[in-house]
Amino acid sequence: MNTGNCFHCGLEINKKEEIIYDEKSFCCNGCKTVYEIFSQNDLSCYYDFQASPGATPLDIKGKYDFLDNEDIVSKLLEFQEDATHIVSLYIPHIHCSSCIWILENLQKLQQGINTSQVNFPEKRVRITFNPEETSLKKIVELLCSIGYEPYISLDNFDEGKKVIDRSLIYKIGVAFFCFGNIMLLSFPEYFEVEEYWINEYRGFFRWLIFAISLPAFFYSASGYYVSAYKSIKSGMLNIDIPIALGIVVMFIRSTVDIVFDYGQGFFDSMTGLIFFMLLGKLFQQKTYDFLSFERDYKSYFPIAITKILADGSETSVQVYDIQKGDRLLIRNQELIPVDGILISEKASIDYSFVTGEAVAIEKKSGDKIFAGGKQMGKVIEIEVLFSVSQSYLTQLWSNDVFQKKIDIKHKTITDKISRYFTPALLGLAIISFLYWIFIDTNTAFNVFTAILIVACPCALALTAPFTLGNVLRILGKRKFYLKNAIVIEQLAKVDSIVFDKTGTITTNKKTSITYEGTPLTDFDLKLLNNALRGSNHPLSRRLYEFIPNQIKLIPTHFEEIIGKGIYAEINGNTIKLGSSQFLKTMTENTHKKTKVHVEINGVYKGSYVFNNQYREGLEQLFHQLSKKYNLIILSGDNDGERKILEKMLPSTTKLVFNQKPEQKLEYIEELQKQGKNVMMIGDGLNDAGALAQSNIGISISENVNVFSPACDGILDASQFQKIGFFMNYSKKAMKTIFMSFGLSLAYNVVGLTYAVSGNLSPLVAAIIMPLSTITIVSFVTIMTNFYARNSQPATRNFQPATKNNPA
Amino acid sequence: MSVIYFLISISIFVAVFFLYAFIKAVRSGQYDDDYTPSVRMLFDDELKISTNKKPIQTIKEKQV
């Protein structure tokens, strides 16, 4: 059973730290403890469903003390009564069937838990427990101890009861009921046989059909009437107007038909149409339950924090109640929710949530600390300068961009087309009516209604939902998760792409330096180290830190040639460090990598390679994109890397440095004023404003389960080099929509020729409508899949399921 | 032939019953999570009764 990987969490085991217990290897004590808990409680089946499903439990001492606070607990509970409390917790680690099994057997680990139920797609567990026997704090601590740490943030505090809108499903159910039964009851009339019993019961069938169509007409289709009314009121002609008009005309004409016994009416087509269109709506509504696109700082911030009272005792306080002058205690890995001044001697703060920069920043006593950082290491104390809402970072959210809710930012392609379609349709109907009225009044009315019925842009209205819905799914499979279908249309329109630097085009892994060439002796290293000490070049500084500390030697001669390298003499040894031109010993073939070559006493030794931390495929991606798009890099950092970026990226790329969060937002606004369609790709909270302001904000995430700022789409970092493909694909999707518009117009023309000549029978309508729907749906599905396969490079890398670490 | 009234009424009644059942099922939240139940149904009562209650204490901690 020694695979070299931990039996519990599956990570590789460092041989020195291996722990063998019960003939199984574990990577650390934490993993072993979880195994112990499970095996003692007869729950070792956990390991049978999936190999190494677990996560290492983290140290949480004191982290959940705030759950002793009754007010906070009652805000978190979903349901509260004397003997029953229900809480629903988000657990990012839920990823396999073992997780479901263990979490649904929680009652075996803790007295007082009645039931627990997992919702896998949402990564939530809903626990019912008896507060007299256990408490929320105990449950949370239990979850942590078995490696399933729940994520509790300020967001949970504000969220009220979630109301799930299921009306669309009801509408579809009702529409399908009406559609199916009407079709069935219409059959005798389709064949138009003049048999005695059909003539006898015709009235009964027709009135029954009429009755059954009422729920579909009044309830299922109600959304279209409302939308059409709104669009007329606001003076924008959208696609729902001809749809609503078609449905209403169809209903009235059919009713008139059966009242005066002209025919059977179009109830079958009408209900079918409603059903199919609602189905299209549902299809377009692909949502990713485990992702949230509406996050703001609240999703990152803790609910409560430890406050130190004047008498030195500690208490947990709700984050909103923190006031200026309070003293707070921040533990290891805890997030600092407010701006403050460091009181403790030293702190090491990780701002990766904010900037994407993974390297922690050192702070000294008296330094100002901004909210959003995570303390790494020892416990620190800070004094509060501003309350939560007035802190530097959170102030960004008071910008107007975040105030406007789901607005009509985008005008959809269907709406645009319907601006021409609707007047044209009405025009045609009126002209035909005027033409026929001089010949035969009866036919004139028939033709008028027939045109509105046939031209009801059912196929047109279905095209976009089905195409975009399918594209949304295909992109989701490739780890590009979009908020909704409209984003795809926007994606196709983009002409400028703005990238954040740290964390977006760079990975958050630390830069590594490797040495290539003949191995250096300790003496060589000593010489190198001392030669480097005098240089201020950034590469020298980094290399100096990389080489282990050596005894100080004073160079007898030291010379730094700017842009080339260093020449030093120490105790009679000559050292040359620098670029290949400087050393003149070899011709460089790979000038893309940053290298420092080493020559000691005239002998070429080798080179130090600075592996840049830029994402793989960055150069190819930028060169590919630069042909079609304006590329801009908008960074909050100083311009230390300008040279490297200029060398790597196409010359058309604009580089802007030293941008504060608000400046990023303003920069995007400025671009938009120039008429550009901007896509912003960012990652940290400091990009949140720019992401919200841009036409499309895409956030890049190393682990999509971990939190990303509010955006229109989330891209898995491993797919970064495929951005070009995604952009291309969105354009192809729009092309598909146009092609299928053509197809549906062709259907309309065929149908209209029947209608204008006054020959539209209910049977023809009942055939044409579903037929056109089926053609359109299959056409767009085939086309989008075809494009997805073809515009993708042959190498499709299947990645193993990423291990999620609890945030 | 008036039995047709009776038959059609029955068919409509059955259809209405199914519609009612569907709406009730949706309302109760059955369709909110369409993945977990598919996994859950495959769990047997998997609790193994371990042969020896006390875990074997063979901890070899080779920590350096």
Image (spheres, coloured by chain):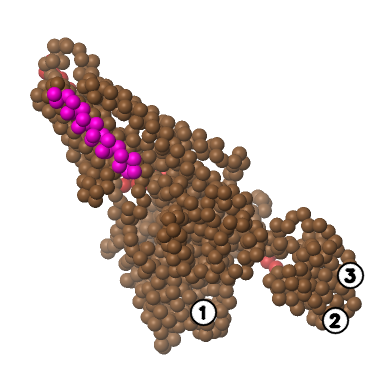
Chain colours: A brown, B red
Using the image, determine if residue A467 lies above or below residue A632: above
The kind of secondary structure element at disc 1 is strand
**Segment tinted magenta in the rendering:** A415-438
Q: Position of residue A712 (x, y in %)?
A: 42, 54
Identified at 44% across, 86% down, the residue is A312
What chain does mark 2 sit on?
A
**Pair 2/1: label in front:** 2
Please indicate, yes or no, whether residue A653 appears anywhere in the rendered image. Answer: yes
Q: Position of residue A292 (x, y in %)?
A: 41, 56
Task: Give the quadrant of residue A26.
Answer: bottom right
Q: Residues within 10 Å of mark 3 (few under 14, many from 20)?
A: few
**Label 2 – label 3 distance at C-alpha:** 15 Å
CA neighbours of label 2 inside 10 A, class few (<14), some (14 to 19), many (20+): few
Which is more N-terminal, label 3 or label 2? 2
Q: Tag 3: residue type?
A: Asn
Of A703 and A107, the residue lying toward us = A703
Residue tagged 1: A380
Q: Please report the residue visible at 46 percent of the width from the left and 32 percent of the height from the top.
A: A782
Which residue in the protein does label 3 denote? A601
Q: Which residue is mark 2?
A: A556
